[in-house]
Image (cartoon, grey):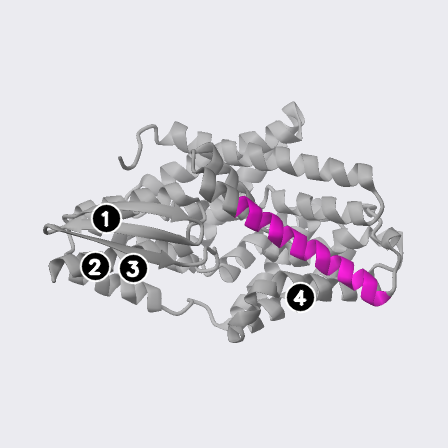
Amino acid sequence: MAHGQITGALVLLTGLLLRNSGEGAEEVEQSAKAAARGLGAQAELVVVPDGATVTVASHGRVTTRAVREFPEVFRMDQVVALKPLLAAITAGHLDALEADRKLAAIEASRPPYPWWLKLIGVVLFAVGFAPLMQPTWYEVWTTAVLGTVTAALAVGVERVPRLTAVLPLVAATTVSLVTLEAFARTPAHGGPVLLMLPALFYFVPGDYLSAATAELAAGFITTGAIRLVYAVFLLVQLYFGVLLGLVITGRDRHALFDVAARSDLPRWALFLAWIVFTAGTVLAFAIPARLTVPLLLLVYFTVGVQSGFTELVGEVGGTFAAATALGALATRLAARPGGPPRIVLLLPGFFTLTVGSLGMRGLTDLAGGHPVQGFHDLTKMITIVTAIAVGLVLGEVVAAPRRRGP
């Protein structure tokens, strides 16, 4: 009976870790093994992005179970709740029965915010990001409209889960249609893709791209390769959705011109945009409200480091420096007793580095008949995503030189 309880608790824990595996397979494996030792057992895992086999040895018995969970970053409240529980299990403060009960409570918990607050959060997330694409008032209010469309789709799909797999395609097609018909009438307001990107930013897989690169760097070749392919698939869905909008409206591919509008946002608006962005991140990704101020400070810290070093060593160097500094600070803060999980601290600051949008912009430039700019953006995406992933890993190594598990 004890062996069965331990196995059940570790399987449930592995499922929760997989579902929220924003930092990759290594964290899942180390955490599950440490929890097994805390429960008086030994565990071995074989991890892929959407599943794992868990082999548990205890009380003279060995059991192997398969676990499957799709990775996502939309329930950060569960990640926050799981961290102290995992620490208690690892320290041996809970038996298997109590651990299983508390893990089941986390798994069954409802999001901390109602659907309408998540909808507002997705809109704020997009609006806060808009000035990074084009610092114009037109970009901001256009994003507010388009962001409401994508937010409604993101919230509505929760009632029809089978549509989740094609949600990026549906969102991109809808945004493309509305943008081409209503907002991208003249180059004076910027290219259509620059108007579309903030509203689609919620679906851009920048986190998957960086996690995949980090996994490859850590030697998790299969897991990293699979996650990388999936990230590219999501980007292609968004790209194809934009093209579908072009086809449905009967526009020529050259309608996807890539021209930035002249800035008309004052500096104070650019400063306040990060507050809007952070508030949106908290609501959209179900982060506990008490973490809003620390996350906002991390966002300003990341933007400040990136801006300063970009002036000194260029964009790639600035992005690498910002990722390293963010990774180191998040690691130190997460290591403190009662500190938030590292992935939660990284999330808003990571999004400010905007790696995924480069891939989307590169693909649409190619489709719009701008091969030089398109390949430039795609090459830049590869360089930046590597800089971010290596920077985050380096920051963790510098701040926590000793491994957290065997």
Q: Main secondary structure of the magenta part?
A: helix
Q: Residue 46: where, in percent of width, then height?
A: 35, 46
Judged by depth in the image, the label closer to the viewer, 2 or 4, is: 4
Left or right: residue 16 compared with residue 308 = left
Q: Earlier in the sequence, mark 4 or mark 3?
A: 3
Q: Earlier in the sequence, mark 2 or mark 3?
A: 3
Q: Residue at x 25, y 50 (%)?
A: 55
What segment carries the magenta color?
227-249
Q: Are marks 1 and 2 in contact (CB under 8 Å)?
A: yes
Q: In what element is the residue under mark 4?
A: helix
Instruction: Identify the mark at residue 99; answer none if there is no mark.
Output: 2
Q: Which mark is residue 12?
A: 3
Measured Cα–Cα span from mark 3 to mark 1: 12 Å
Q: Amino acid at mark 1?
A: Ala
Badge 3 crowding class, 10 Å Cα cut-off, few under 14, some 14 to 19, many 20 or more, is some
Q: Is residue 164 magenta?
A: no
